[in-house]
Image (cartoon, helix red, strand yellow):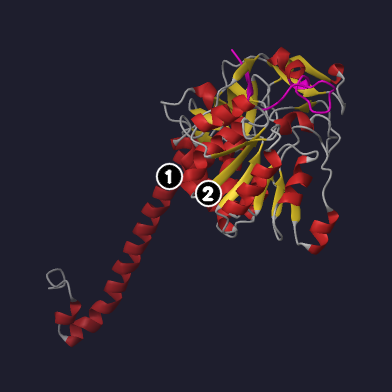
Amino acid sequence: LLLASPDSRELPPRLQREDEPHRHRIHHSAMQFDAVWASLAFGALGCLLLLACRRRGGKDLPKAMRRLVVVEPNALALARVVVEEEAPLPVLKRGQVLIKVCAASINPSDYGAWRARSAKGEYPLPTGQECSGVVVATGGGVSTLGLLGRRVAAFPGSGTYADYVACSAWRLVCLPGSVALADACEFFINPLTVVAMLLTARAKRATAIIHTGASSALGQMLCKAAPGFGVEVVHVTHRQQHVEMLHRLGATHVLNSSSDSYGAELDEKIRALRVKLAFDCVAGDSAGALVAKLPPRSTVYAYGRLSSSYLSAIPVIDLIYRGKKVEGFMVTRAFAKLGPLGLLRMLLAMQTIKRELQTTFATEFADVRLEEVYERVVAIDPERPGAKSATNQKLRVVFD
């Protein structure tokens, strides 16, 4: 009767009372049995995770590598920045991967940092901020699962002018097979800066902005990306051939700062488009000239130093009485200022960049070898007498 009746409430009251201890024993045994199986299952899952998260790769790697390092802070003394021929490979920590570098982009912020003193006072100081390459080893950890052998764009923050670089798994993006690996070496700094500029303009309800240094790689990206954000851009460049190039890219408002009519044309664009935001990468007198031209309560963001390391000719009266501002602009801080969703917007921007890396955010590069980097960069350093223009060219270091 007990076996035939799944519900003991169908039993007579006397039998129900007698059956109560027996049912409790069965229930307790079943719970113990389930707990044992659950423990075994979780234990097996833990073992699988440990096996999956262990260090991988790195068996056939060389014992040493080449890298470009700053020996000590300097101005333009070539001997202070050298190529180390027998540098040790990075030792991976948990959550890091080792990337065999294919190409590394050269940004003005890179060679600007060469003269800055290391915060920790540690030398030799590795150089280079972003790169593209292939993951050849992992240091273990859940974040590194599935990354071995993947083609990636990475932003380690330092050390990319080298044959190999260590990078946190959270600081890289896996690339689709359609993207040429070397062309992805400039995935982060310029494209994210462009998106940050346009999101900043949108956050300030600006429908138009001014951008100097418009023929640079970043300026060309901005020219192609701005229509998608509903922002008009007044592109300012200093050569007529750059004006024609920007028009071919689809720019509507392009001014030549070397033209005699530049000042009047800029005034007209500011009035017609109601411009109150400007992004300046030239420095020197450029930022001051923009401050003087813009209407009250305008802002000029300084984000580069193509002509000088200093800002000058800024009208103090405009700052005090007309509410104008000059601010530094850095991509990470710009996203942080967008509010609690700033990080999410950065992640979404990276997905957009991945989709449009061969179109909107495409760049034409000039390739240099590791041994040529310092000489080529010194040639465009704005503090060097007779320096060449740094706009309309983008250098990248290529490796075998």
Tell me the quarter of the picture where residue 73 sits.
Answer: top right
Tell me the quarter of the picture where residue 371 sits.
Answer: top right
Is 334 on the left-hand or right-hand side of 220? right
Quadrant (top left, top right, bottom left, bottom right) of the C terminus: top right
Identity of the residue furthest to the bottom in this view? 13
Q: Which residue has dot 2 on it?
A: 231
Query: Residue 164, position in %: x, y?
Result: 64, 22
Chain part drawn in magenta: 377-400
Amino acid type, residue under disc 1 in the picture: Leu
Is 281 on the left-hand or right-hand side of 124? left
- Residue 292 vertical position relative to residue 173 in the rendered view, above or below: below
Which element type, helix, strand or loop, lies under badge 1?
helix
Is residue 361 shown to the viewer in this render? Answer: yes
Amino acid type, residue under disc 2 in the picture: Val
Which element type, helix, strand or loop, lies under badge 2?
loop
Q: Which residue has dot 1 on it?
A: 45
Is residue 96 shown to the viewer in this render? Answer: no
Residue at 56%, 33% (x, y): give it. 220
Query: Residue 91, position in %: x, y?
Result: 68, 28
- Residue 80 vertical position relative to residue 348 in the rendered view, above or below: above
- Residue 283 vertical position relative to residue 343 in the rendered view, above or below: above
Question: Foreground residue, 280 or 174?
Answer: 280
Mark 2 or mark 1: which is in front?
Answer: 2
Q: Is residue 361 magenta?
A: no
- Residue 367 vertical position relative to residue 39 in the rendered view, above or below: above
